[in-house]
Image (cartoon, helix red, strand yellow):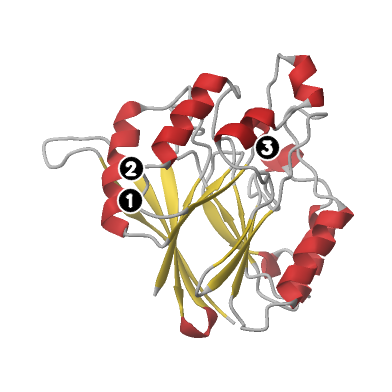
Amino acid sequence: MHRIIQLSDLHFGTVNAHVLNALVHTLRQLSPSLCIVSGDITQRARRSEFLAANAWLKTLPAPVLCIPGNHDIPLFALWTRFLHPYGRYRRYLHKEVEPLLETDRAIVIGVNTTTPFRHKRGIVSDAQIRRVEQLALDNAAGKGVIVVAHHPFHVLDEADEDQLVENHEAAIRAWSAAGVDLILGGHIHVPYVYPLTRRYPDLPNPTLVVQGGTTTSYRVRRHIPNSLNVLDLYPEKKIHITTWTYQSKDSGHADRFTCAEKDMWKTV
């Protein structure tokens, strides 16, 4: 079994310290082979926030693959926003905004859906679609193919439809045909797993959307607690996904993340 943890929307600058401490202990217990962070690592792309995020990410018990979110581009410093939107991100977190990583069981492909010309909604270009498509088609070893973006490719609530990444249907159809198994996202702070064949019954591959909530920020939505996703990859492309949510301490236990009832199997 090969374990990958999805963290999302950390929002350093608005981090709940109790949640962060509980997360450290949980990650040690889960012993992942890889940690994925699906964007919005900072709250306002300030230098101090990137430094804090960088220092914390270095403490994780596994390699980290991250991609930027819309909050990782300066909002008010317009000169920097439009001329060097990813300058601080590249300096303090990762030189690549679309990283590619291959493990024993998976090919993980980062897709940058942010743009300095939009404050919230993202976009995936035709060139990005073709890049992922080709990487998935080149998967001769038959590994699981995971795409990581920030903006969602499917939403459950009508109120979130304006946050769907532009050009999402074209990407879904091309990537499913090429063999992409999972599309990980964040942005809307609502965790869920959704089989895209429910929305697009003619898809050739049962691709899943795996949305992350906000893992450490106090900016939770709809009273949904902080959360992370655990992806367990087994032989023959069998994938088990669970969502773990934060519980504050009470008389019976300390602050912790626990496995929620949500779970899903994917077998190709």
Labels 2 and 1 touching (C-beta < 8 A): yes
Q: Secondary structure at mark 2?
A: helix
Q: Callout 3, which amino acid? A: Ala
Residue at image position (56%, 21%) is: 47
Residue marked by disc 3: 159
Q: Decide if residue 185 is on the left or right side of residue 26.
A: right
Q: Secondary structure at mark 3?
A: helix
Which residue is at the far left?
Answer: 251
Label 3 CA crowd tier, 10 Å (few <14, some 14–19, many 20+): few
- Residue 181 versus residue 143: which sits nearer the camera? 143
Q: Decide if residue 89 is on the left or right side of residue 3.
A: right
Label 2 CA crowd tier, 10 Å (few <14, some 14–19, many 20+): many
Residue at image position (43%, 49%) is: 228
Q: Callout 1, which amino acid? A: Leu
Q: Decide if residue 207 is on the left or right side of residue 171.
A: left
Q: Is residue 129 above or below residue 186?
A: below
Residue marked by disc 1: 27
Considering the image in quadrants, where does the C terminus appear? bottom right
Q: Quadrant of residue 40?
A: top right
Labels 3 and 1 touching (C-beta < 8 A): no
Q: Position of residue 95 (x, y in %)?
A: 64, 42
Q: CA distance from mark 2 to mark 3?
A: 29 Å
Label 1 CA crowd tier, 10 Å (few <14, some 14–19, many 20+): some
Residue marked by disc 2: 23
